[in-house]
Image (cartoon, grey):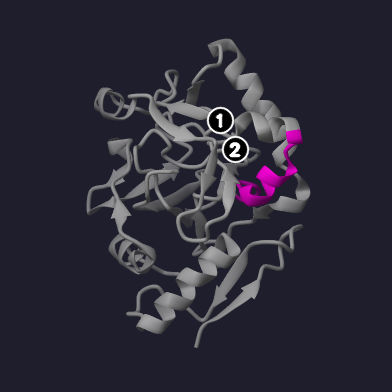
Amino acid sequence: MISVNPLRDTLSDTFGAEVVGLDLRRPMKAETVATLNQALLDNIILVIRGQDLTAREFRDGIANFGAPMMQHRAHFRLPECPEVSRIVNRENMRPAAMWHTDHTNHERPPKATVLYARKLPGAGGDTCFADMYEGLRYLSSEARDRIENMVTLNSMEPDSPSYSAADRARHSQGVRHPMVRTHPETGKQALYFHLTKALDIEGMENHAVRPFLDDLLDQAIRPENTLRHHWTLGDVVICDNRCAMHRADPDFDQAEERLLWRVILEGDKPV
């Protein structure tokens, strides 16, 4: 019997929940799948602890939330299960320390990102999450009015050494996304952009884009709408990309390996 309980290790009491009694290796009844998917919509972040999964079991268990989609950075896909990718502080992969929502350089970015802890440093290496329904509400009235119809143009970061030429050829086309996104299931609006993939904003001078986005984050990210996940081995965390941002905290000993497996789930074209 599964239960969905508020998280205890967070400063926020507005979002985030822990799923207790779930083994992702086992088939789920339809009512369990419905309960879990509703819990994700209600809580934005779900934590499932104590999992012991092969790559295929991870992919198949998470497929109850949606269809896994292929990720860019082909080099980091697991050969035995390419829908699962490695997130690791090795091989020129830099920590994603900036607030972002994943794969905005895709026409249909993922509905959810799912991370599974495989190797962890002795201390640190947390992942932080932010509720962007609330983030939008925290903006000044001037900023909120200004971004109402703004569109970002999203490509791969030009200075990242972990992207291949094939990645860039396929996924650096300046994909257009609204900065205020309406969630396709809840109908609620959220602030939506990737700080380092939004290389341009339509109608804005290029040099002004990054300061503008930084200012929005300064307004939108507060202790009240963020939570910090302290990883333990076997944790699985599901994040609704349509209404949340996340970032990795790089404040740990980089001589130690931090390895997460990641599955992302097919999403809709943002509107």
13 is higher (above) or lower (below) than 112: below
- Residue 130 shows up from this direction: no
Seen in the image, is 191 located left or right of residue 57?
Answer: right
Amino acid carrying label 1: it is: Leu
The residue carrying mark 2 is 99
165 is higher (above) or lower (below) than 4: above
Q: Residue 118, how many percent across, how many down? A: 45, 56
Residue at left 50%, top 53%?
183
Image mark for residue 195: 1
The secondary structure type at the circle numbered 2 is loop
Looking at the rendered structure, the number of numbered marks drawn on it comes to 2
Residue at left 72%, top 60%?
10
- Residue 144 shows up from this direction: yes
**Image quadrant occupied by the C terminus:** top left
Q: Residue 247, how many percent across, how many down? A: 58, 42
Seen in the image, is 22 located left or right of residue 247?
Answer: left
Q: Which residues are magenta?
A: 122-141
Q: 164 and 67: which one is in front?
A: 67
Residue at left 40%, top 73%?
24
Instruction: Determine whether label 2 and label 1 are within 8 Å by CB.
Output: yes
Q: Residue 231, how many percent across, how many down? A: 59, 57
Q: Is residue 140 magenta?
A: yes
The secondary structure type at the circle numbered 1 is loop
Find residue 144 and report its image quarter.
top right
Classify mark 2: residues with Cα within 10 Å, few (<14), some (14-19) or many (20+): many
Amino acid carrying label 2: it is: Trp
